[in-house]
Image: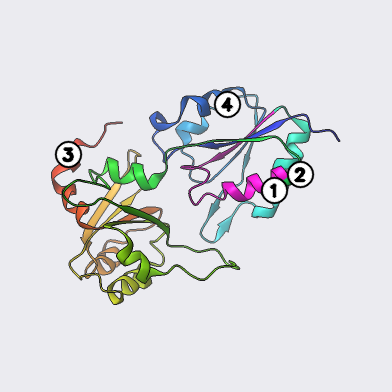
């Protein structure tokens, strides 16, 4: 069948509907089909054209609504049937969002596809918590890394020793479940036990929560307070600004 539609990989941002891009919002309002992820906020889902077909393809730890291979095939099939297909992804499609994988499959299948970037949670969540990732007096570089690596990867695991010494600020996505291992690796690599750590859960949403500590204390704090995912971890001296700047968190 001749391809009749186009797929748009749209970043929904981290949760606050005000951070959704104008281009992304316009596509949701005219979409024929929207395939969305688990972490897309309800407020953003309400922007979708009421006549559009809505399909939940979300993935959470231990709970996959749809396998990635099935999602890829679904997008190809829907593009044969509909003019505008939106693949709505939390944050940014290309930052730990599998957008690159989906785009590869669509291109191989001859499906027209376009990416619409979104604000990634690794930038937005710390900002809403009053933690600037770079600062003239504290940090001139930042590293973004995943704390939850996919099975069957072709490359070795994250080199935490290199990450520890690669920049002044480290931002870890999906790191809560592996936090004890990650902290142990960073300490073994030579980071001081007193290195500040902040965890930001449900970043930019009304129920955003923050937990601050150090490499020495944070794992115990997480266990004690039952601080769960989804959360972004920020490691580095910029975390010390949280106590001063947190009062300026944007309102909802």
Q: Are marks 4 and 1 in contact (CB under 8 Å)?
A: no
**Between marks 4 and 1 in the image, the one whose residue lies nearer the viewer:** 1
**Residue 44 percent across, percent down from the top left:** 48, 32
Q: Are marks 3 and 1 in contact (CB under 8 Å)?
A: no
Identify the residue shown where x is 69% and y is 48%: 105
Classify residue 8 as left or right of residue 214: right
* Span of residues in magenta: 84-107
Separation (CA) of disc 3 from disc 2: 49 Å
Identify the residue shown where x is 64% and y is 53%: 68
Q: Secondary structure at mark 4?
A: helix
Mark 3 / mark 1, whichever is N-terminal: 1
For residue 249, what is the image quadrant? Answer: top left
Separation (CA) of disc 4 from disc 2: 22 Å
**Residue 63 percent across, percent down from the top left:** 56, 57
Mark 4 / mark 2, whichever is N-terminal: 4
Q: From where the camera sits, is residue 239 visible?
A: yes
Where the C terminus falls, by quadrant?
top left
Q: Quick check: is 93 in the magenta stretch? A: yes
**Residue 171 percent across, percent down from the top left:** 34, 55
Classify residue 32 as left or right of residue 233: right
Residue indicated by mark 4: 27
Q: Secondary structure at mark 2?
A: loop
Residue indicated by mark 2: 109
Mark 4 / mark 1, whichever is N-terminal: 4
């Amino acid at each position: 069948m001749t391809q009749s539609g186009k797929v748009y990989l749209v970043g929904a941002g981290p949760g606050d509907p005000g951070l959704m891009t104008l281009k992304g919002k316009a596509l949701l309002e005219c979409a024929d089909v929207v395939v969305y992820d688990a972490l897309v906020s309800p407020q953003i889902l309400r922007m979708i054209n009421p006549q559009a077909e809505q399909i939940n393809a979300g993935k959470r730890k231990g709970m996959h609504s749809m396998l990635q291979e099935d999602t890829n095939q679904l997008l190809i099939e829907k593009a044969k049937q509909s003019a505008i297909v939106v693949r709505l992804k939390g944050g940014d499609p290309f930052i730990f969002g599998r957008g690159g994988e989906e785009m590869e499959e669509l291109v191989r299948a001859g499906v027209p596809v376009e990416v619409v970037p979104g604000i990634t949670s690794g930038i937005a969540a710390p900002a809403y918590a009053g933690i600037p990732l770079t600062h003239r007096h504290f940090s001139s570089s930042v590293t973004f890394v995943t704390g939850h690596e996919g099975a069957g990867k072709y490359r070795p695991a994250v080199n935490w020793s290199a990450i520890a010494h690669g920049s002044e600020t480290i931002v870890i996505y999906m790191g809560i479940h592996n936090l004890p291992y990650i902290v142990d690796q960073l300490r073994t690599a030579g980071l001081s036990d007193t290195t500040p750590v902040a965890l930001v859960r449900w970043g930019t949403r009304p129920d955003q929560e923050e937990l601050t500590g150090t490499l020495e204390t944070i794992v115990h704090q997480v266990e004690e307070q039952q601080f769960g995912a989804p959360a972004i971890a920020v490691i580095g001296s910029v975390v010390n600004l949280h106590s001063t700047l947190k009062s300026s968190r944007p309102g909802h």
